[in-house]
Image (cartoon, rainbow, N blue to C red):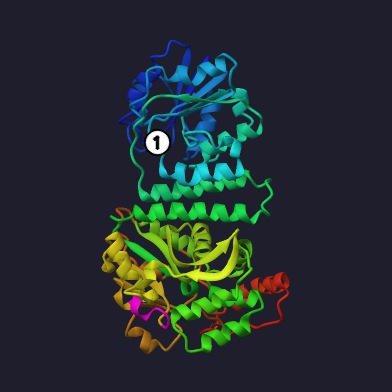
Amino acid sequence: MISVVIPVLNEGATIRQVIKTIKKTSRQIEIIVVDDNSTDNTVAEAMKEEVRVITSSQRGKGISMREGMMAAKGDIIAYVDGDILTYPDNIIDLLTIPIESDEADFVKSYFERQAGRVTQLVAKPLLSILYPELAHFQQPLSGMIAARKNLLTTVHFENDYGVDIGLLIDVHLQGARIREANIGRIENAMQTWEQLSKMSREVSRTILRKAENIPSENLETLGNINVIREQMEYSILESIEKMEKMVIFNLDHAVFTQDYLHWAAIAFDEEQRYLAIQAAELSPIERLKKITALFEGRNLAELLEVADAIPIIPGIEAVVYELKRRGYVCGLVTESYGCVARHIKNKLGMDFVFANKIQLINSVSTGEFTPGNHFMQLGTYSKQHLLAHISKEYGIATQNIIYVGDGKHDEQLLVNAGIGVAFCPQYQRSAVEKIADKIITGLSLQPLLEIVPDVTPVKKGIKIPPIKLDKRQATRIGIGSLVGLGAAGLLYLALRYRSKDKKVKEAC
């Protein structure tokens, strides 16, 4: 017998039609609808078709798929999505016949529709690098699959967008015979930019985690993976044209507790030259050229290792999560490098990056950089041009942008943004008050949630434990130097790069 498992979430409008199509097969089947705790009439509609309906123990497609498999009585299990109305009448036959005839252990569907952006820009390129033997699959993220139950009991079901690619990799690693099946033309709803961004992160994370046993010393491979992520990010950014609310964080003064370029100079034993460059009277581009030259010969892994060693503002992940729940797209701006900023963006669950680009050949720095076009205007370079670029290229009015930065380095951005938030400003409060709409003086971004309006129907605030400091501690700890958090990271870098003993100066 064949068990057909349909994981569903709020698909009351389509589930009955899907079930009716599945029932057209001539094979002996059972249909199990696994409800992912829907809030609409999905369960009631499914029960009208007299099929078995169970509720998953917790929300998540992977859990629903696994629990549907556990409940199945058939030797062969086929999975189909519950929101597609254009399945062919023989979809179950197409998925299961190769298994019944012992020609395959696992069947992956493909269909006559252009593959989505996550497939083309993330899944396929990563597979071609890490699992080239799987790169030929036309729809590696397709959720319409079939396999023997005894095979599915041996694999891991991811509980996010990575579930389908994860199963494909797992069965491949077990040596299963995998066959593709053409299920005709499929039409489903286009995903939002936020869904695409989330899918991109989760799919790439799954592929990279599955590939942990593959040697990662190959810097060219590491560089190619970074390029793949960069391409997907540009694609996501192009999809936010209709986004109305945006929060931009200055990476070096509102996320990191140290300026990345300065921290990297310390790590690579170049601080004295870095400080001399900063003290010289140079144009912004000339200054960045000379600083980037300090990192010639450093590879991408080393650059990212520096970023990982810089402490970040406590609780920022929870703040970003809440901002996105409220409907804001969140991103980073920095005058350092996109490869570094994207690495932090992914760790914090943000959506985009505006940065400069360090030139890499085989993932090794040439010592040169390319300024971001978002910082250029009429041939002149300035980070302050960013909001005008966003308004022109993406149609987001500056009054709908919240900028979180530092009063000393971000004066014009704080003035021009709809809400300019100075975070731990590095010069006198009276001066900052003239340019910023709001000031956060502590070492937590929790107050940002009190500034940013929550226009969602149901307000669900979050509480981040405050950092308790006495007056003496407060005078010694600032955004540029979190001694307690930074000491371990700086010691690590000193040992890692055999740097001389150095002290990080307090910035405020």
Q: Residue at x 57, y 13 (%)?
A: 101
Q: Nearer the viewer, residue 13 or 349?
A: 349
Identify the residue shown where x is 53% and y is 76%: 259
User: In which quadrant of the rendered view does residue 362 lie?
Assistant: bottom right
Asked whether residue 394 is in view, the answer is yes
The quadrant in which residue 49 appears is: top left
Q: Position of residue 474 (x, y in %)?
A: 53, 83
Are there few (<14), some (14-19), or many (20+) residues within 10 Å of tag 1?
many
Amino acid type, callout 1: Leu
Q: Is 413 part of what is drawn in magenta?
A: yes
Is 308 contained in the magenta span?
A: no
Residue nearest the observer in this picture, 365 or 145: 365
Residue 465, position as x, y percentages in the image? 51, 67
| Residue 129: % across, % down | 59, 45
At numbered mark 1, what does the secondary structure look like: helix, strand or loop?
A: loop
Pick whichever, 389 or 143, lies toward us. Answer: 389
In this rendered view, identify the residue nearer to me: 70 or 422: 422
Please give the name of the residue rendered at 34% of the width and 68% of the height, measured from the top-left corner: 402
**Total numbered circles:** 1
Which span is picked out in magenta?
A: 408-414
List x then y, in percent, for residue 424. 45, 79
Residue drawn at the location 36% of the way across and 36% of the way down = 10
Where on the picture, by quarter, is residue 185?
A: top left
| Placement of 248 over or under 128, stated as above or below | below
User: Is 9 drawn above or below residue 80 in the view shown?
Assistant: below
In the picture, measured across the screen, residue 152 lies left or right of residue 182, that is right
Residue 472 seen: no
Q: Is residue 506 above or below residue 166?
A: below
Residue named by callout 1? 9
